[in-house]
Image: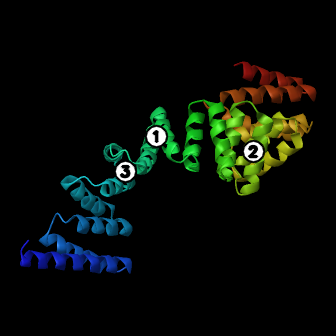
Amino acid sequence: MSLTELKKSLEVIKELIDAIEYADKGENKKAIELLNSILKKDPENFLANYILGIIYKLEGDFEKANECFEKIFLNNFSQLSCNNLICVNFILGNAHKVLYYAEKLEKTKKKCVCVSNFHKALIYMESMEYEKALEELDKLLEVNNKFILAWRFKAEIYKNLGRFEEALTCIEKVIELGGKNSASWMLKGEILENLGKLKEALKAYYVALELNKNLKFLYKKVGYLELTQGNYNEAIKYLGEYLNNYKDVEGKYYLALAYEKTKDYKKALDLYSEVIEELENKKINEVILTNSLIRKAKLLEILGKLEEALELYNKALN
């Protein structure tokens, strides 16, 4: 290397250091100007492209960040640029590119590929390729079996696949590792409900409500499960509160059932009437409509209103 070339190299190194210092102070505009100046003289400068890509990434300009990391990748494979390309393309929604760069990175056989496994798992989950997602999550857990989010995603996938015992094992692992939040307990409740373990599901939902009292939509599940357990006053309490916040004909039907069980026939009849009015002549919730007609007819029969009861029985049969 000649003295002139050495001098130019030293100048570039100094400019790179200055750019890093500007970026470190948050003076990104100055850093970008300096790095672009370097790249005009040396378009393939690895470090300049890398620093510029990181700055653009921090600025939220993911398209420009992607350009910088791709220049590095195309000129010479770089594990760091590849990892950034996975992250940036994931944010940009370029799923095929994420998978492409993740596969390239995996060939390095380094443990750090767990980041790419996570991105791949999310993409496969989004496209409902659940078996592939499980494979990637298992690779992640081989590196770190205390990765709570991986266990959580496995629980969701197994639930979606109807593999509820496996889902339960995973969500219990989440809670054991410290994922004691309302979302985890809600998921546990849903899994237990699908397993027919209704008392345990109800307990899980109550824990979720203790952790987050704003989960008003959960009152419907709690009310329904209290109804199945024969706790009719609790069912009325939670379903009533739920219906104060949401318009839901199914919730109204469950509340009517609860009132019927407590022999508050007037309130039950009023609610069945509302359900019938909402659903009559609509091709939705036909089972609830038929059941409401039959149950209302039975109550009218108990009250001695036989003609009205007969009319409703006929409607239900038709």
Q: Amino acid at mark 2?
A: Ala
- Residue 216 place in picture, x, y as percent: 71, 52
Up-down: is 298 above or below 215? Answer: above
Report which residue position mark 2 lands on: 204
- What is the distance, in whole Å, between disc 1 and disc 2 at their CAs? 29 Å
Up-down: is 55 above or below 3? Answer: above
Report which residue position mark 3 lands on: 93
Please give the name of the residue rendered at 88% of the width and 39% of the height, measured from the top-left corner.
231
188 on left or right of 271: left
Where, by quadrant of the figure, is residue 3 drawn? Answer: bottom left
Helix, strand, or loop for circle 1?
A: helix
Query: Which label belongs to residue 136?
Result: 1
Marks 1 and 3 in Cβ contact (< 8 Å): no
Closer to the camera in the image, 35 or 231: 35
Where, by quadrant of the figure, is residue 127 drawn? Answer: top left
Query: Which label belongs to residue 83?
Result: none
- Residue 201 place in picture, x, y as percent: 75, 39
